[in-house]
Image (cartoon, rainbow, N blue to C red):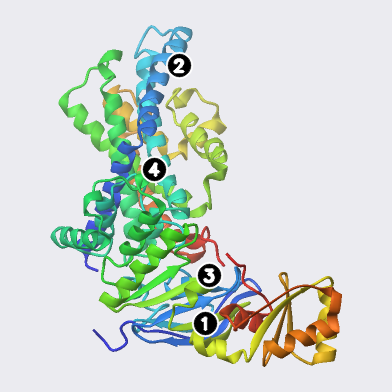
């Protein structure tokens, strides 16, 4: 199979991801409800409590973090759909097709990242409500940052998906992956206010650098240099995508959910 | 097409999971265009064999060739030349019939135009052209299965692997699936490798392999296999099967197999055996039934087990 056919296969895996999302209405609605909850329920509450006189309001500070959570959920959920689809559904059709595992991982990451970025973009429409001014240049920068961040998180999600057998333990994934990544990301509070051990955890969380990118573009008040954010995300996504491909290649991970009779 | 196209060869093929030999060194050779059934109980190693032949599991020992390609060395070439229909559907319920088919085309390297043509062609074969834009979740189980099977053939596979394809379907849908598979065989001349525990499905095939605890205990045409069980089979149910089995063995000296459903006694002629049975067992007998050897009798005589009736 040539590069072109592999690229086409990856693209159709990605398109399928988007199509499926928009046909699952409940998934669409819950995706849009989540950021509204954070911005207009949690935000104002803590905003009053933390009333600040200088710099951005708490709601404004929270905005990049909410973009982060949208990207986090969108990417991880899309990657984890691999697990249920491997048990019952389309991933098996991909596994028996004459395409290398790397194409499957690439397609899933592209699809998940496009989906998560699209979800982030719809949240961006709320920026004017929080008096965050947006220029055209900022919108384009945000699109780039959304894509880079969601590619990274999707690749990590694919590594996770290759490692786990079923989603029966989804609550464990929530508690040990999704929540820690969100609460230790600098999205809810500035990293510099955290005690030292937590700050270390924040520093090894890739989402931190994604949210920091959003802060650079939207608030002009970030915690790490721009180049560091970009560099970390690029390196992590490359390592994770390679790792996911290698893990998928192991037969035991691949057909373990199939009933071996 | 190369001469090996459509053939399947296994040489000392084995798969171990830890210390368990799920498949324990099996050998067979399937001709192009042949309809081959692998029969066995759950856990006999049928699916493991099939997964090795379709490159989804790597053999622990031995080797296999499908369409002339080695499954361990050229998995992509093998996958490019086969269709595999799993017991569970691999269709996307949230996509339409046509979307599912064209997704498959892209996975097999077809360009947009080629896949459009192929999708229309297959929709015609399936007689589902008017359902092309229907979501798969709205199709009946039988139609979904047809679509699953057709999907295995989108790329003109020469070998079609079917893993218990009619499980969970009602008898009517099952018959229609088999009519569909038969018509595909006639028009396309493909090799079919079926794993099943339904005897009447194995009965249709050219040759049957019987797998028991990872070993291939028989491989022949259904007619030959049945002829190997000589004479008639008498099925007797008694008040105490164990005691009756001993009596029959000692006093009549004919082969007896015990199963959950009762005793299966094989003799040259049922006409003379039945009076003998009444003579030695008398009032112990609850029911007697005689028949010509079936594949189930073959299976029983080889493995000591009967396959569950439907």
Instruction: Report helix, strand or loop for mark 2.
Output: helix
Estimate the spatial distance between the alpha carbons at disc 1 and disc 4, rounded to whole Å: 42 Å
Residue B135 % position (x, y): 31, 45
Give me the disc on residue A42.
2
Question: Between B137 and B256, which is closer to the camera in this rendering?
Answer: B256
Circles 3 and 4: CB atoms closer than 8 Å? no
Chain name for mark 4: A
Instruction: Report helix, strand or loop for mark 1.
Output: strand
Q: Is residue A135 visible?
A: yes
Give me the disc on residue A157.
none
Question: Between B10 and A184, which is closer to the camera in this rendering?
Answer: B10
Estimate the spatial distance between the alpha carbons at disc 3 and disc 4, rounded to whole Å: 38 Å
In the picture of the structure, the residue carrying the numbered disc 1 is B209
Circle nearer the viewer, 2 or 3: 3
Instruction: Report helix, strand or loop for mark 4.
Output: helix
Circle nearer the viewer, 2 or 4: 4
Q: Earlier in the sequence, mark 2 or mark 4?
A: 2
Residue B146 % position (x, y): 35, 60
Give me the disc on residue A78.
4
Residue A90 % position (x, y): 38, 54
Chain name for mark 2: A
User: Which picture quadrant has residue A169?
Assistant: top right
In the picture of the structure, the residue carrying the numbered disc 3 is B198
Circle nearer the viewer, 1 or 3: 3
């Amino acid at each position: 199979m040539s590069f072109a056919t592999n690229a086409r296969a990856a693209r159709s895996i990605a398109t399928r991801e988007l199509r499926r999302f928009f046909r699952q209405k409940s998934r669409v609605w819950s995706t849009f409800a989540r950021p509204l909850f954070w911005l207009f329920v949690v935000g104002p509450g803590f905003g009053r409590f933390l009333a600040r006189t200088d710099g951005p309001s708490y709601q404004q500070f929270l905005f990049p973090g909410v973009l982060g959570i949208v990207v986090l959920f969108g990417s991880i959920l899309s990657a984890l759909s691999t697990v249920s689809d491997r048990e019952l559904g389309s991933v098996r059709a991909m596994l028996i097709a004459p395409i290398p595992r790397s194409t499957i991982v690439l397609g899933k990451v592209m699809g998940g990242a496009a989906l998560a970025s699209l979800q982030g973009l719809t949240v961006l429409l709320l920026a004017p409500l929080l008096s965050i001014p947006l220029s055209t240049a900022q919108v384009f920068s945000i699109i780039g940052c959304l894509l880079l961040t969601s590619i990274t998180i999707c690749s990590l999600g694919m590594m996770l998906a290759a490692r786990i057998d079923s989603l029966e333990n989804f609550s464990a994934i929530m508690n040990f992956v999704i929540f820690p990544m969100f609460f230790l990301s600098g999205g809810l509070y500035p990293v510099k206010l955290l005690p030292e051990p937590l700050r270390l955890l924040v520093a090894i969380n890739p989402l931190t650098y994604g949210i920091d990118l959003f802060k650079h573009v939207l608030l002009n008040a970030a915690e790490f240099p721009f180049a560091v954010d970009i560099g970390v995300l690029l390196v992590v996504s490359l390592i994770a995508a390679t790792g996911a491909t290698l893990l998928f290649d192991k037969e035991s991970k691949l057909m373990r959910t199939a009933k071996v009779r | 097409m190369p001469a090996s196209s459509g053939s399947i060869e296994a040489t000392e093929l084995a798969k171990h999971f830890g210390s368990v030999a799920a498949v324990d060194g099996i050998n067979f050779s399937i001709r192009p265009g042949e309809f081959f059934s692998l029969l066995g109980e759950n856990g006999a190693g049928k699916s493991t064999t099939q997964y090795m032949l379709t490159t989804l599991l790597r053999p622990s020992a031995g080797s296999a060739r499908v369409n002339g390609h080695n499954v361990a060395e050229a998995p992509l070439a093998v996958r490019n030349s086969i269709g595999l229909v799993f017991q569970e559907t691999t269709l996307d319920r949230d996509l339409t019939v046509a979307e599912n088919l064209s997704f498959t085309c892209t996975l097999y390297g077809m360009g947009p135009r080629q896949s459009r043509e192929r999708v229309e062609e297959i929709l015609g074969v399936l007689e589902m052209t008017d359902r092309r834009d229907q979501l798969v979740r709205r199709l009946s189980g039988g139609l979904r299965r047809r679509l699953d099977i057709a999907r295995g053939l989108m790329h003109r596979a020469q070998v079609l692997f079917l893993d218990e394809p009619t499980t969970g379907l009602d008898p009517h849908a099952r018959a229609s699936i088999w009519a569909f598979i038969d018509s595909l065989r006639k028009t396309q001349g493909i090799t079919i490798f079926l794993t099943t525990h339904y005897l009447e499905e194995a009965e249709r095939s050219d040759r049957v392999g019987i797998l028991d605890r990872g070993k291939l205990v028989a491989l022949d045409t259904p007619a030959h296999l049945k002829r190997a069980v000589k004479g008639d089979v008498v099925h007797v149910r008694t008040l105490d099967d164990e005691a009756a089995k001993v009596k029959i063995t000692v006093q009549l000296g004919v082969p007896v197999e015990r199963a959950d459903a009762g005793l299966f006694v094989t003799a040259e002629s049922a006409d003379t055996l039945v009076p003998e049975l009444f003579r030695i067992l008398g009032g112990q007998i609850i029911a007697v039934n005689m028949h010509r050897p079936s594949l189930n009798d073959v299976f029983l005589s080889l493995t000591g087990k009967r396959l569950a009736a439907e």
